[in-house]
Amino acid sequence: MIDISLGNALGSTGASDLFQILRDGRPRTRTELANLTGLARSTIALRIDALTELGLVGPAGDAPSTGGRPSSQFALATDTKVVLAVDIGASHIRLAVSDLSGRPLLEDATDMEVSAGPEAVLNWVIDAGDALLTAAGRSLADLLAIGVGLPGPVEHGSGRPINPPIMPGWDRFDVPGWLQAHFDVPVLVDNDVNIMALGERELAWPDVDHLVFIKVATGIGSGVISGGMLQRGAQGIAGDIGHVQVSRGLDVPCHCGNRGCLEALASGPALAKALRARSIDAHGSQDVVDLVKHGNLEAIQAVRQAGRDLGEVLTACVSLINPSVIVIGGSMAQAGEHLIAGVREVVYTRSMPLATQHLQITQSSAGVNAAVLGASILAIYHALSPAVVEAMVARHTG
């Protein structure tokens, strides 16, 4: 247990409070920080020194001179510490070592089925993570946290996947514990669509507080940001729209055991299956996308209908959550405007005019990078939170 009653000039929360001011990246002088906090310059100096020694804050040049000696400025040091971002998909793993702004320094990726099991997948993450850190000229001492996205439901409190339908052998596996045993830093695990929502917002919509990110790929899910906060719900499965029933497909079985699920009608594999029934060679999402790009009329019509099915579910979401932006991502978003046109057709027709007056429905700007960027942001939010920074200062000065 960390004792945060420091009993010295730092105070119990002073350094972390000061750091939260500097997190916006704007350089400030000691005088500016003293005016903002009401603290004495000598106290500010002590706290700046502690944060600088931790590598969290650094000099940022001099302020413009007003006649005397220019004052030194300080800001968030984005390049002294790093986080590791991990995007585990149904058939891929992507890694990035990122600085504290979320900018990837080095990346790696491999094709691996998540069905290979947690030990095989996570051991690859450990080996590749070590190699990336070394290649970036960093050590484990520079690593603050790890963010991980998984393609299934995740219990937020424990970071363990719970009954994930496409992840055999992963149910309740201690993902954070497995990685933490090697890297010895906090490991944050979330559903892949949640972290994609974080990544998309960070890249393209930083000022939007109400956003829904939809992933359409092997499965279908959504990440919901409301009031500027990621909404996980009571058990961490908020946004699991893939198994909402769609009226058109009441007789279509889904792998979850029910019938008529959105995922059974509008996911990449579902569309490929429907096209094969029409004697068109398609075996997965990429095949469907390729057919659309080559102008295959039946594939275009199938994708447009998938958009309508998705729009039927999103109409309820628009009334319930009232987002400003709906972003469509995942591999099927590469089909371009055909999928989004189907979504717009239904949402704009069936939703209340006030809810859609300024609603934007658009394709993901982050694309395949959304999950890695979001995993970085997940790790950074934790690593730079007031409680964690305070604990780091306590360990350093205790």
Image (cartoon, rainbow, N blue to C red):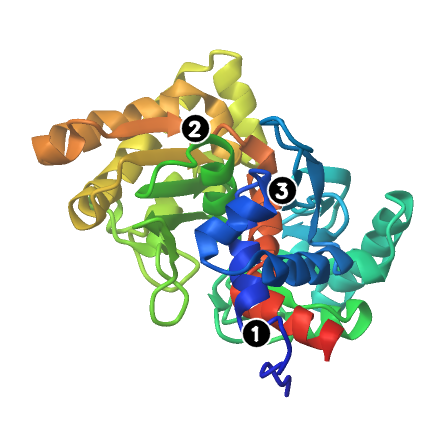
Residue lying at 62% horizontally and 73% vertically, measured from the top left: 9
- Label of residue 278 in the image: 2
Residue lying at 64% horizontally and 78% vertically, measured from the top left: 8
Which residue carries the number 3 mark? 101
Query: Element type at marker 3?
Result: loop
Up/down of 85 relative to 187, above or below:
above
Alpha carbon of mark 1 to alpha carbon of mark 3: how far?
A: 27 Å
Alpha carbon of mark 2 to alpha carbon of mark 3: how far?
A: 49 Å
Residue lying at 14% horizontally and 36% vertically, measured from the top left: 355
Q: Residue 99 at x, y = what percent? A: 70, 44
Which residue carries the number 1 mark? 11
Residue lying at 57% horizontally and 41% vertically, measured from the top left: 28
- CB atoms of marks 2 and 1 within 8 Å: no
What amino acid does circle 1 point to?
Gly
Mark 2 nearby-residue class (10 Å; few <14, some 14–19, many ≥20): few
Considering every residue shown, the one lying at the far top of the view is 295
Q: Residue 249 at x, y = what percent? A: 26, 46
Query: Element type at marker 1?
Result: loop
